Image: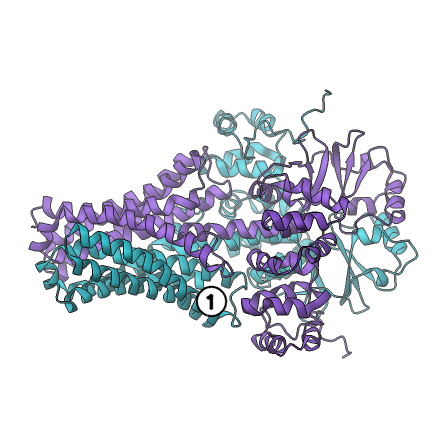
Chain colours: A purple, B cyan
Amino acid sequence: MTDTDSPVDARPDTNLDEDDRLKPAFVRAVIDAVEREDSEAVRLLVAALHTADIADLIEQVPGEIRHDLAGALGDRLDGDVIAELNDWVRDELMEVLGPVQVADIAGTMDTDDAVAMIEELDDSDQQAVLDALDPDDRAAIETALSYPEESAGRLMQRELIAVPQHWTVGDVIDWLRRDEELTTDFWEIFVVDHRHHPIGTCQLSWILRTPRDIAIEDVMQREQTLIPVDMDQEEVALRFQKYGLISAAVVDSSGRLAGMITVDDVLHIVQEEAGEDALLLSGAGDGDINEPLRESYKARVRWLIANLGTALVASFIISRFEDAIATMATLAVLMPIVASLGGNAGTQTMAVAVRALATNQLTRSNSLRTIRREIALALLNGGTVAVLIGIGTGVVFGNPRLGGVIATAMIVNILIAGLAGVLVPLTLERLDQDPAVASSVFVTMITDSIGFLAFLGLAVASGLV
Amino acid sequence: MTDTDSPVDARPDTNLDEDDRLKPAFVRAVIDAVEREDSEAVRLLVAALHTADIADLIEQVPGEIRHDLAGALGDRLDGDVIAELNDWVRDELMEVLGPVQVADIAGTMDTDDAVAMIEELDDSDQQAVLDALDPDDRAAIETALSYPEESAGRLMQRELIAVPQHWTVGDVIDWLRRDEELTTDFWEIFVVDHRHHPIGTCQLSWILRTPRDIAIEDVMQREQTLIPVDMDQEEVALRFQKYGLISAAVVDSSGRLAGMITVDDVLHIVQEEAGEDALLLSGAGDGDINEPLRESYKARVRWLIANLGTALVASFIISRFEDAIATMATLAVLMPIVASLGGNAGTQTMAVAVRALATNQLTRSNSLRTIRREIALALLNGGTVAVLIGIGTGVVFGNPRLGGVIATAMIVNILIAGLAGVLVPLTLERLDQDPAVASSVFVTMITDSIGFLAFLGLAVASGLV
């Protein structure tokens, strides 16, 4: 056995637990050092950390000591660390650093990371940072900022490798070796015509496996996915997934090569957009534990108030049956069961439909089929639950008619829940609304209202009260 | 203007709508051709489609014609198409293709795709496919199948480029040009020592930018992220995101290079795992519109029955107050509002906590801080909603004491909801349970029960009834 015999991870990760997170004791030690104002100790502690872990560290410490930690980190707080930070934490940090310092850091970053860093600043702070940048960087960032938020133009980096179509493989390799100014991080090169329009893409592995005298045009792939600068980032992410892309050329409105998007940026978007649906469906907005309290309050209270409105609708329906309830209070005991199960069934269907819409799996071609499928499922689920609750109620209350009423109401409500769970998101999508945002409120209102109405209405209609 | 003047997308995409989905009319035309048994027409229709779109097409047609479509596609139904298929649709298709045909297709695929294709087959079908494979492919696939499901070993491909540490850049390039057998799709090469342990990783762009006589050891990066074969795929995805990886070496238990995972495979996992939480939180299991009805029924009815159990707990609490409700049926009208808003607030907090846990943002270092944050939010939200409902109820029913009771119950329930929303997922995580799976049932039970108990209990205690 030799000294390299801990092969599973070559990073010095003694500060990380088995899930690759910073150990609480380590975070505590850093906090102590910051509180003692011992910058030397802080720098020693973080010396072996990867940039991604320094970013994690900044996120994990309490907000009030982040500024001092940032100061103690010195030049370890570079562009790479800031690019890895949670959006909210980064914005908070930007506000305490001066414009000159932010501009210094931005100058070392790829365009996309620099844009992500300064796009959330106030207009005046943003202007101050832009003024402090050198003219080239400033022009690149200003162009990027001129594109809509969350568009390909914001996401792309301008650092890329583009070669003319008449070059050979050897020309490309010689140029790459010769020109010191070129970027070193790229996975594909783009071949352009005299108007700077991309006409093909070439993986580096193909270049490496081809003799020097072959024309690059004969190696490149002509079928390529070009991303328009104004394409929404969610759409960009779907393209990367669908076509298994590593990088893609971004073209401006006249078809010229404007930049490149790489898969590592897309990974963050996929993660964000896919995770976002769970948060949006719950009405928690952006839902980040680092979001300022005031933002979280605004995002959440809006949906609670909307929910209050829908709860009032359900209340109004119950109030129509007040006499029946006064006569037979057992109805009030049982009615929440029908509403609750309906809500649960509706949420299940809705979550599936929203997901299928987000991944382009549910389309006009199969929506009728999907609706039929959900009806069949609702009948199966509703039937099962109805039998259980019907028999149980009949036996416990010694009242078979009450059992029949709750069983029937349950089937009706779960059926309506299944329909609402798929039709509400589909309708919102057709109306160009994000189905994840508003579906919950409508579906809950429908299942609560129908639940109470079906149960109490059937109780009265069946002559139970 | 020239003939190349539609630069935005070079793929022949007239069959795709603006969101990159197959147009319904096109899908309809394919279905018609399949039903006419006109294979020639089917092949003409799909001639210009990308493999990912052929996979989409198979997903979009009704299940009963998929077999005939597969037959009509002929050799367009290749490994690339099958690798892109939705899991359920692929499994269904595998069952109708014979083992020899499946083995033929598997032989053309990278190990990871072939494993994904056959891992879901019945044991006997799997054996038949393995028997029909050529010995090399068979050995590779059998090794992969010996690793746990959803582990790095299943995900990795064995096709990769590894070079000895003493080679120069020129040696590497010459070998890549010379050896016809090597894979052509790779983004990094791995440098190994004499025991085949990886000692460094080298981006292809670095090789291209370095003179031929430099040693590969001086170009490679020594700090590398090695993935153990038995690491869970969710953990693998987090590593790729955290360190911005394009590919990573997978090592076996003795530290030898066993395979490679590339970011395009990880993209699917990130998408799946992040989207999964919305489905799991709703109790919809895997929740795929292509899942067989029986599987969906089993997954969903389980949670409906669990929900029935929790609804019974709430019912039991209400039943303790039957006399109060008989005296004042208005209580039954109002009580669902308190439960519903609490449920909503709890779901918001829970979604945020589950998301933060899944992305390693919520850790032991900041859980106390997060709990305090949620208490503050709950007091703000609860206060707002309580004022609205309290004043409204007092005015509408001309009963200020009733307004006070519902307002107090609302604050209590939203506070409990906030605590439960963060403590339940945290506790499940500490117990090594997936917080996304079971949190909902507990949180809903707590908010329903406390909602009814607080409101009805306060009504009685305050002398309202």
How far from the left and from the top, in percent, is residue B2?
73, 20
Q: In the drawing, does residue B37 fall left or right of residue B282?
A: right
Most foreground residue, B197 or B400: B400
Residue at image coords 16%, 69%? B461
Most foreground residue, B188 or A390: B188
Residue at image mark 1:
B370
Q: In the drawing, does residue A241 fall left or right of residue A401?
A: right
Most foreground residue, B180 or A177: A177
Amino acid, disc 1? Thr
Seen in the picture, residue B38 relative to A371 is either above or below; the reply is above
Q: In the drawing, does residue A32 fall left or right of residue A178?
A: left
Most foreground residue, B304 or B439: B439
The chain that hosts pointer 1 is B
- Please tell me in which quadrant of the rendered image residue A244 appears: top right
Check the picture and name the quadrant holding the N terminus of chain A.
bottom right
How far from the left and from the top, in percent, is residue B198?
76, 65
How far from the left and from the top, in percent, is residue B186?
74, 51
Q: Residues within 10 Å of mark 1 (few under 14, many from 20)?
A: some
**Can residue A398 be seen in the rendering of this structure?**
yes
**Can residue A244 be seen in the rendering of this structure?**
no
How far from the left and from the top, in percent, is residue A418?
33, 44
SS of the residue at dot 1?
helix
- Please tell me in which quadrant of the rendered image residue B391 appears: bottom left
